[in-house]
């Protein structure tokens, strides 16, 4: 489903991704962990081309885009359509209602009729438990509810892959569960997901694989059980010790 | 009192026929110009940036009255003759365009980067992001300063009297020149400006209220 080959990303002098190679199968849930600044967000953003990689290639589904040469806009658009992102700070459109937020993508970009887009948005909002909040504005919702709208908005694009960048880390602790539950349900449905998170419980329960990143590289990848009980690399062990203290 | 009453009609005529149309037309044209200038300023194309900067710099760096005089009294030397009203429309539009572009630019820049990214993520192009996500939010932010600009513009149109536009203040001057009631006529004109601006600030309040619907806090 996803194949990443030799992915590099540089911001000026700073090399943030130093050659990422990664294969993710259809229906897999992959959790990415790693210290702050290790490039987790950048990796996700490259998959949705919110950052243009410096070199390397990304394949999602049947679309391959090679960034080593100048990339045609068409190729960028085609690749972007394959994934949808859920942001740490939701990034909902504050001037639109919940329903409009979710309808916007299908109408504007997928050229769905208003009626069809509305049906799709309503179904998705019911699915994330917000069927009674359709006409609310984002600021009238709790953080957990807003993030669930964010998830519905991403799902409405019918992506091949869902990308989550620390979807619960801006939330009050008591609101984390409802968002993770929605994500668990998606995983059970067989949606391919790449999730950056510090929620180790989620990783243990839901992930098929955990990837540990440090300093722009993938240090280690394995099943959650193995990763958490017997990590192969010293750096992984140090990191896991650190976060398990908290 | 009699003079105040008989002069009211010509003053209001100047108001309705020139002052208000001039203000409204120049504001609308100026806003359109301002949006494009603001976009040019924040664009990554250097030449657009330069043109926009140059335009804003010229307009802000020279007195409005001098600009009007150049348009109306200066250009005929080059064979370009513009009637008073169109000359005033051009002058005031250019003026609004420059000042309002700074307001709109600041408003666009005040919208969090995450909004651009969310728009991009759902597949919007640059112009779709602008039209559907950024500008609607920037509009809310710019209503108070733009209202100020409009109110300022209504009063500034009195300068058009100096390029022979028979707007309200020029009417007042003309009447005063015949009956020497300077104080009375100028105070009367001032009162009318004040009433207009008073209503405009009420409209501003309504607009702000309407756009505050979706705002956090
Ligand atoms: N637009 C940018 N311009 C310059 N440097 C950037 C930019 N975005 C990220 N960086 C740098 O890239 C590095 C990796 O950032 P990234 O956000 O991918 O890390 P992260 O693993 O997601 O960290 P965190 O856990 O704190 O979210 C950091 O050093 C960051 O400062
Ligand atoms: Mg991050």
Image (tube, coloured by chain):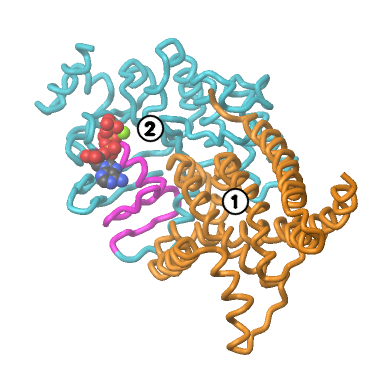
Chain colours: A cyan, B orange
**On the picture, is A237 further left or further right than A132?**
left
- Discs 1, 2 touching: Cβ within 8 Å: no
**Residue B21 showing in the rendered view:** no
The picture places residue A167, in percent across and down from the top left corner, at 41, 27
Crowding at dot 1, Cα within 10 Å, few <14 / some 14-19 / many 20+, comes out as few
The picture places residue A66, in percent across and down from the top left corner, at 34, 59
Q: Chain of mark 2?
A: A
* SS class, disc 2: strand
Front-most of residues A17 and A187: A17
The picture places residue A83, in percent across and down from the top left corner, at 46, 43
- Residue B86, above or below A29: below
Verify whether residue A59 appears in magenta.
yes
Front-most of residues B100 and B154: B154
Residue at the image position 44 percent from the left and 57 percent from the top: B42
Q: Quadrant of residue A23?
A: top left
Label drawn at residue A202: none
Q: Which residue is mark 2?
A: A165
Per the rendered image, the range of residues in magenta is: A39-68
**On the picture, is A12 further left or further right than B193?**
left
**On the picture, is A153 further left or further right than B186?**
left
Residue at the image position 67 percent from the left and 34 percent from the top: B205
Q: Which residue is mark 1?
A: B131
Say if labels 1 and 2 share a chain: no
Mark 2 residue's CB less than 8 Å from ligand 2 = yes
Quadrant where the image shows the N terminus of chain B:
top right
* SS class, disc 1: helix
């Amino acid at each position: 489903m996803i194949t990443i080959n030799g992915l590099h990303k540089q911001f000026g002098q700073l090399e943030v991704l130093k050659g990422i190679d990664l294969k993710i199968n259809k229906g897999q849930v992959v959790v990415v962990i790693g210290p702050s600044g290790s490039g987790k967000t950048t990796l996700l953003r490259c998959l949705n081309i919110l950052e243009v990689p410096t070199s390397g290639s990304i394949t999602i589904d049947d679309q391959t885009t090679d960034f080593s040469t100048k990339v045609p806009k068409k190729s960028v658009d085609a690749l972007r359509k394959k994934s949808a992102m859920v942001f740490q700070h939701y990034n909902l459109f504050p001037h639109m209602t919940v329903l409009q937020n979710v309808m916007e993508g299908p109408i504007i970009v997928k050229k769905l009729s208003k009626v069809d887009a509305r049906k799709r948005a309503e179904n998705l909002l019911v699915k994330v438990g917000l069927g009674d909040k359709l006409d609310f504005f984002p600021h009238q919702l709790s953080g957990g509810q807003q993030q669930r709208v964010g998830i519905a908005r991403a799902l409405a694009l019918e992506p091949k892959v869902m990308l989550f960048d620390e979807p619960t880390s801006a939330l009050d602790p008591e609101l984390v569960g409802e968002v993770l539950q929605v994500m668990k349900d998606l995983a059970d449905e067989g949606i391919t997901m790449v999730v950056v998170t510090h929620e180790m419980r989620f990783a243990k329960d839901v992930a098929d694989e955990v990837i540990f990143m440090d300093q722009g590289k993938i240090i280690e990848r394995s099943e959650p059980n193995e990763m958490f009980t017997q990590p192969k690399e010293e750096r992984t062990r140090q990191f896991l010790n650190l976060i398990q203290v908290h | 009192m009699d003079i105040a009453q008989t002069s009211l009609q010509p003053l209001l005529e100047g108001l309705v026929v020139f002052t208000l149309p001039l203000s409204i037309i120049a504001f609308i044209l100026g806003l359109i110009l301002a949006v494009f200038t603001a976009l040019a300023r924040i664009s990554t194309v250097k030449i657009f940036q330069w043109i926009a900067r140059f335009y804003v710099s010229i307009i802000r760096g020279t007195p409005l009255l001098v600009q009007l005089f150049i348009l109306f009294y200066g250009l005929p030397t080059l064979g370009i003759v513009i009637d008073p009203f169109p000359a005033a429309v051009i002058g005031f539009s250019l003026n609004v365009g420059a000042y309002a572009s700074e307001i709109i630019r600041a408003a666009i820049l005040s919208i969090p980067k995450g909004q651009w990214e969310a728009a991009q993520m759902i597949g919007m192009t640059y112009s779709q992001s602008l039209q559907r996500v950024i500008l609607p939010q920037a509009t809310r932010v710019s209503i108070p300063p733009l209202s100020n600009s409009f109110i300022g513009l209504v009063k500034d149109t009195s300068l058009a009297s100096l390029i022979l536009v028979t707007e309200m203040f020029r009417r007042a001057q003309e009447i005063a020149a015949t009956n020497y009631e300077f104080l009375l006529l100028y105070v009367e004109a001032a009162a009318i400006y004040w009433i207009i601006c008073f209503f405009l600030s009420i409209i501003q309040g309504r607009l702000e209220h309407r756009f505050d619907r979706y705002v956090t806090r």
